[in-house]
Image: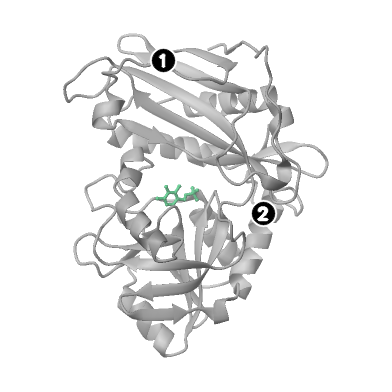
Amino acid sequence: MQITITRTQSPKAKPDQNNLGFGNYFTDHMFLMNYDEGKGWHSPRIVPYGPLSLDPSAMCLHYGQEVFEGLKAYRAADGSVSLFRPDKNMARLNLSNDRLCIPPINEEFAVEAIKELIRVDEDWIPTADGTSLYIRPFIFAADPFIGVRPGKNLIFCVILSPVGAYYPEGLNPVKIYVESNYVRAVKGGMGFTKAGGNYAASLKAQGDAYKLGFSQVLWLDGVERKYIEEVGTMNVFFVIDGVIVTPELTGSILGGVTRTSCIDILKNWGMSVQERPISIQEVADAYDAGKLDEVFGTGTAAVISPVGLLRWENKDMNINGGEIGKISQKLYDTLTGIQWGKIEDTFGWTVKV
Ligand SMILES: *Cc1c(COP(=O)(O)O)cnc(C)c1O
C-alpha cells in the first residue's frame, strides 16, 4: 500500500522545549487509514493534523470499541532519530485488536507508516534533555450504527506529541495509593489489552487518590484484593532483600514493553528476577522486616518511576528514605542511554527512522 502525503499549508508554532509537560502539544500531521468490511484496511494517508468528522452514532462513542498504543521517537546527539522496539507495540496492538474484535493490522506496514509520519514532522522532535516525541496509534469503530456488534468501519489514526517528563516530579519518587476498593480488570476481561475502556474504569480511583495527594493507585487483583497487579499506567517491580520481583502476566495485567526490557537488562546484569504472584501483605511484611529495598514503576511514558511512599489502608511505607534506589537509577540510565543513543544498544532494540 502506498501512503499519500498532503502537507499542511499552515504549520503551527513549536512549543517551548523546556515546558512541554506530557500530551499537551500535537504536531502538524497525522496518519489515517480506514477499514471497511469487504475492502480491508485501505487508503493509508498522512494529512494535516486536525479534527475528525464522525457521525454522532459512531459506534466507538457508545460501546467503547477502541484500542491504542504508546511509544516514543528519540533524537540522538548525532541528530539521528530512533524508535524503541516498535515491533513489540504493533504486536501488542494486534493482541488488543483480537480481544476487542478489531481486524488485525499489518504490523510491518504500521511501523513503516509511523516512520513516514515522523519523517514528515521531523522538526517537531524535541532535542532538550529528557524530551522525546510520543507516538499515539489508535483504532476505533466509526460505523454510524446503534446496536452492539463489532464495527465494520474502523479508523486507524496515529498522532504525535513532543513531550517532557510524564510526572511533574520527573525522576523523583512518587506517592502511590494501594487501592483496596475499586478494581481495574479481572481475568477473562481485557486488562491485558491497551484499551481506552480500561482507563475509563480507572478514573474514579485515580481521582480519589489524587485528592489525597497521591500520583497514582496500585491495583490489586479483582477477586481477592490480595495480589498486586500494576500501577495506573505502569507495571511495578519490588526489590526485596536484593531479589527483584514483579507480578507475572496473568491476563488482567498489561504486558509492558518497558517491563520486558527491564527484565532482560536485569538478567543480563546477572540479577535474579522473579515473575510470580506477589501479595500486598508480602510487601508489607518485607517493609516491616526492613527488606523492602526499592519499588518502581515501568512504562514508556515515565520510563522508570521510583516509588517513595506506598499507602496500604492505614500503613505508610516509606521506601528507601524517599530517595531513588540504586537499581531504579541504574535501570533508568541504561534504558534511556539506549533510547537516546548514549550507550551501545547491545540488545538490538533501537530502530532507525
Ligand atoms: C501502557 C501501559 C503500561 C506500560 O507499558 P509500556 O509498553 O512499557 O509502555 C503499563 N500498564 C498499563 C495499564 C498501560 O496501559
Q: Is residue 175 above or below residue 109?
A: below
| Along the line of sight, the residue nearer the viewer: 40 or 305 | 305
Which comes sooner in the sequence, label 2 or label 1?
1
Residue at the spot of label 2? 336
Q: Label 1 sits on what residue type?
A: Ser
Residue found 29% across the figure and 47% down from its top: 201
Tell whether 235 sits left or right of 181.
right
Q: Which residue is mark 1?
A: 53
Location of residue 22 by image quarter: top right
Q: Position of residue 267 (x, y in %)?
A: 56, 65
Residue 348 visible, this angle? yes
Q: Which is in the foreground here, disc 2 or disc 1?
A: 1
Q: For marks 2 and 1, give the CA distance.
A: 38 Å
> Residue 198 appears in which quarter of the rendering?
top left
For label 1, the SS is loop
SS at circle 2 = helix
